[in-house]
Image (spheres, helix red, strand yellow):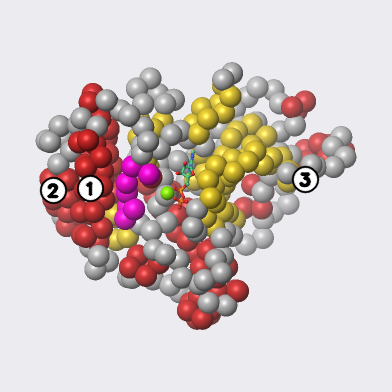
Amino acid sequence: MNPTFDRDAFFARALITTDISELDEDQRWSTWPDTAHTLDRGPQPFPDWVVQHDGAIDTELGILKTGKEADAFLLERALPTEHRTGAPGEEVLLVAKRYRAPERASFHRSHDYAEGRRGTDTREARAIAKGTAFGRQAAAGQWARTEFDVLGRLWSAGLPVPYPVQLQATELLMEFIGTDDEHGTAAAPRLQGTTLGPAAAERFARRLREFVLGMAELGLVHGDLSPYNVLVDTRPAEPDPVVIDVPQVVDLIANPHGIRFLQRDCENLCTWLRAQGASKTAADSAEWAAAAQALATCR
Ligand SMILES: Nc1ncnc2c1ncn2[C@@H]1O[C@H](COP(=O)(O)OP(=O)(O)O)[C@@H](O)[C@H]1O
Ligand SMILES: [Mg+2]
């Protein structure tokens, strides 16, 4: 698809570029205009905080976490200070999750999850199977694409996940869950390592059960749901769970391991929640899994 030439955007950027002599090493022009294909942008309507200006600049703020298949970075996307008016959509913090093309071709969680997934590009499939450099790049791109698409589906269904802003090859940009105020910038802590207390644990149990059931209604299982992949969002008055890390999501019914993954997800969460003081009735993994399965099968 050939994006049409946007005169206004062109001159807006030209205006800004004239007074910026050079970008710093840790900066680039916003890559938003390069993702003109709607499939590479998040669900519409775009939230008002999404920075869409062509003249915005991306600045690397540092690494959040390195992982096996991907690294998460903090990124600021903003208009130069002198061009801001204070309106939404002029500056925002984003998380850039960048998938790596690993030396070894196999992603540790590849096989079981990819079963039943449809691939259309046979050249890619062959290259991935062979583990060529192109194949490794393609595999990384597929994980990024899957995570991006799944986040969009979950977000559109009203489930608590970060809003996926855009996808470009192996880089996924999403909403930053955390706080950014006079005390500084802090990413939301993971559930693992957090102490909730019984009342909050009970509430988290209800919210996370809703999440598992909400996914089941879409016919999906997270597949790697644990206290490591749940963030504690402290922006609302009462903290809420936000679920991340969804590239391995599987179809609950079509994937032969779907039910097993579902049970494991529920056990991981319920065990932790009970240790935090949630009641047996609220954090009952067998009940969660049965309720989820019932929803998925009557779709
Ligand atoms: N949207 C986000 N907002 C804030 N922190 C995030 C976000 N996404 C990821 N992180 C941080 O980066 C870490 C790694 O991200 P994750 O998607 O779980 O990748 P991995 O595959 O490495 O586990 C998370 O544990 C969390 O601390
Ligand atoms: Mg993770």
Q: Earlier in the sequence, mark 2 or mark 1?
A: 1
Q: Looking at the figure, which quarter contains the C terminus?
A: bottom left
Residue extent of the magenta highlight: 222-228
Q: How many marks?
A: 3
Q: Residue at x 11, y 35 (%)?
A: 281
Residue 73 appears in the picture as rendered: yes
**Disc 1 residue: CB within 8 Å of ligand 2:** no
Q: Looking at the figure, which quarter contains the N terminus?
A: bottom right
Circle 2/circle 1 CB separation < 8 Å:
yes
**Is residue 238 in the magenta section?**
no
Amino acid at circle 1: Cys
Residue 275: % across, % down: 22, 35
Image quarter of residue 193: top left
- Residue where numbered disc 3 is placed: 25
- Residue where numbered disc 1 is placed: 266
Q: Residue at x 57, y 77 (%)?
A: 132
Q: Residue at x 26, y 58 (%)?
A: 261
Query: For this view, does 214 lie left or right of residue 146?
Result: left
Circle 2/circle 3 CB separation < 8 Å:
no
Q: Which mark is residue 85?
A: none
Residue 98: % across, % down: 56, 53
**Label 1 to label 3: alpha-carbon separation:** 44 Å
56 w.r.t. 222: above or below:
above
Frontmost residue, 55 versus 210: 210
